[in-house]
């Protein structure tokens, strides 16, 4: 499944930069579903970015409102 995906609405995103990141530097982004609020149809994601030395450069949380059909798919992940 791909999030945000069709019909999803980005509700909020908060993040902090933990280490410098330089122009042209490659980044690996990792996203994990950390919570699913079925009543409100909100999926919470942990978002982390690492540089090529595997140093955490950005850490954050995103919340998305997803259609019920996609919510069922997120619960299976």
Image (tube, rainbow, N blue to C red):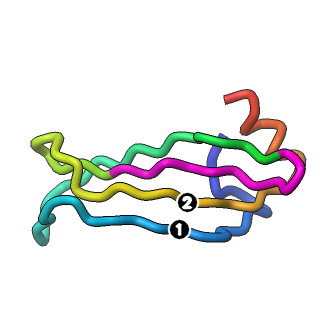
Give the x, y percent position of residue 39: 89, 50
Say which quarter of the image contains residue 16.
bottom left
User: Dominant secondary structure of the magenta stretch?
Assistant: strand
Indicate whether 35 appears above or below 6. above
Instruction: Judge by depth and name the residue closer to the eye, 44 or 25.
Output: 44
Q: Residue at x 81, y 44 (%)?
A: 71
**Residue under label 1:** 13
Instruction: Find residue 61 and report its horizontal and vertical position in percent.
Output: 50, 57
Percent coordinates x, y for residue 8 in the rendering: 74, 62
In the rendered image, residue 39 lying in the magenta stretch gets the answer: yes
Q: Which residues are magenta?
A: 38-48
Q: In this rendering, would 60 be left or right of 53?
A: right
Alpha carbons under labels 2 and 1: distance apart: 4 Å
Spot occupied by residue 64 in the image (x, y as percentages of width and height): 68, 60
Left or right position of 73 against 43: right
Q: Residue at x 10, y 42 (%)?
A: 53
According to the picture, the residue beneath numbered tag 2 turns out to be: 62
Relative to 77, say whether 32 is above or below: below
Q: Would residue 60 be found to the left or right of residue 33 on screen? A: left
Question: Which residue lies at the image location 10% right of the left edge and 68% below the top edge?
Answer: 22
**Which residue is rendered at x = 15% and y = 65% of the image?**
21
- C-beta proximity under 8 Å, tags 2 and 1: yes
Neighbour tally class for label 2: few under 14, some 14-19, many 20 plus, Cα within 10 Å: some
Quarter placement of the N terminus:
top right
Q: Quadrant of the C terminus?
A: top right
Does the magenta-highlighted stretch encompass residue 77? no
- Label 1 sits on a secondary structure element that is strand
Q: Earlier in the sequence, mark 2 or mark 1?
A: 1
Label 2 element class: strand
């Amino acid at each position: 499944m791909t999030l945000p995906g069709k019909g999803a609405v980005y509700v909020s995103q908060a993040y902090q930069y933990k280490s410098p990141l330089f122009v042209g530097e490659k980044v690996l982004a990792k996203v994990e579903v950390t919570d699913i609020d079925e009543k409100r149809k909100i999926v919470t994601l942990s978002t982390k970015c690492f540089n090529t030395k595997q140093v955490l450069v950005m850490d954050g949380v995103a919340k998305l409102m997803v259609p019920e059909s996609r919510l069922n798919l997120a619960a299976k992940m």
